Image (cartoon, rainbow, N blue to C red):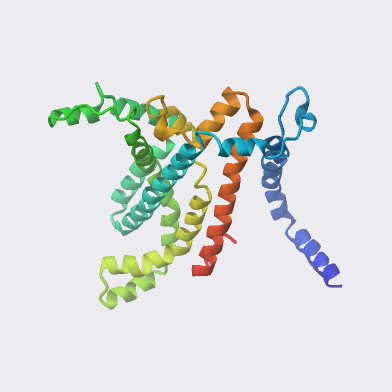
Amino acid sequence: MNKKNKGRRLLLAIKRHWRLYVLITPVLVYFAIFHYLPMYGVQIAFKDFIGTRGIWGSPWVGFKHFERFFESYFFWRLLKNTIGISLYELAVGFPVPILLALMINEVRQSSYKRFVQTVTYAPHFLSTVVLVGMLVIFLSPTSGIINKAIEAFGGEPVYFLTEPQWFKSIYVFSGVWQTMGWSSIIYLAALTGIDPHLHEAARVDGATRLQRIWHINLPGIRPTIVILLILNIGSIMGVGFEKIFLMQNSLNMESSDVISTYVYRSGILGAQYSFSAAVGLFNSIVNFILLISVNQIARRLNQASLW
């Protein structure tokens, strides 16, 4: 009877709110077609894929491609670079939008506030190709403005884009410059939900602006911070392909070679489809485990989590 009652209640809810279910249908169809159905092809990671035989006709080889990847010369370099860049980006890029949002929120002059928001949001709309092109121009050892400034102070030109030790910093800080304004929007939205009476009471008690930010604003946006932190850690192995590929060259390969670029070289250029699928699947499984683990830790610590 309980199951029947639950089924009836569900049908009544669908019937009552059918317009909402119609609105969400395109989203469900999109995810089903473009995200879940393609999972059918994941099985080629466990096969020696032969195009003429198709996925079902290709011979099953089990974990052969995974073992090959774990035992390869590039494995530890790829893992170190992928995790290193992601952690560097998380350590630098995650707090900056929070600080920017807190500072913008304290601006009282609306015209200046809109100006700052426009200036910080604008880089988000630059394409990756344009951004990397700007980096090439600004960091050129012969005509770049950065090296011209270094030479003006008596220094020697620095080959930023070819020296491995500079790659991670350039990648991370250029990304922070491009995304910090856009990423701060969600924190600004969370700050608007804080009760202004809390600030009024704090002012009456003699709290300074920094004390109000620390004891009112930060706790008020803490659930948002935790959820975004979980999402960022859950994609820690998913370093973007485009920007790294465009910045990559044979001289900085030691620091720039990550799992996504390796999959491109071995899968697309080398036509090793099964091997590249195995590497990509390994990457996705690690991200999935991290997401589940961090979500559980966050839920136990402060009861703010994705689920």
Q: Is residue 13 left or right of residue 45?
A: right
In the picture, residue 138 is in which quadrant? top left
Indicate whether 283 appears above or below 208.
above
The answer to whether one can see residue 18 in this image is yes
In the picture, residue 44 is in which quadrant? top right
Q: Quadrant of the N terminus?
A: bottom right
Give coordinates of residue 163: x percent, y percent. Answer: 32, 30
Q: Is residue 24 left or right of residue 299?
A: right
Q: Quadrant of the C terminus?
A: bottom right
Q: Residue at x 36, y 54 (%)?
A: 101
**Residue placed furthest toward the bottom:** 205
Query: Which is nearer the eye, 227 or 48?
Result: 48
Give coordinates of residue 226: x percent, y percent. Answer: 47, 60
Query: Which is nearer the eye, 35 or 51?
Result: 51
In the picture, residue 55 is in which quadrant? top right
Query: Which is nearer the eye, 180 or 92?
Result: 92
Give coordinates of residue 263: x percent, y percent. Answer: 56, 32
The answer to whether one can see residue 127 in this image is no
Q: Residue at x 33, y 73 (%)?
A: 200
- Total numbered badges shown on the rendered structure: 0
Q: Is residue 70 left or right of residue 139?
A: right
Q: Is residue 121 left or right of residue 14?
A: left
Give coordinates of residue 26: x percent, y percent. Answer: 69, 44
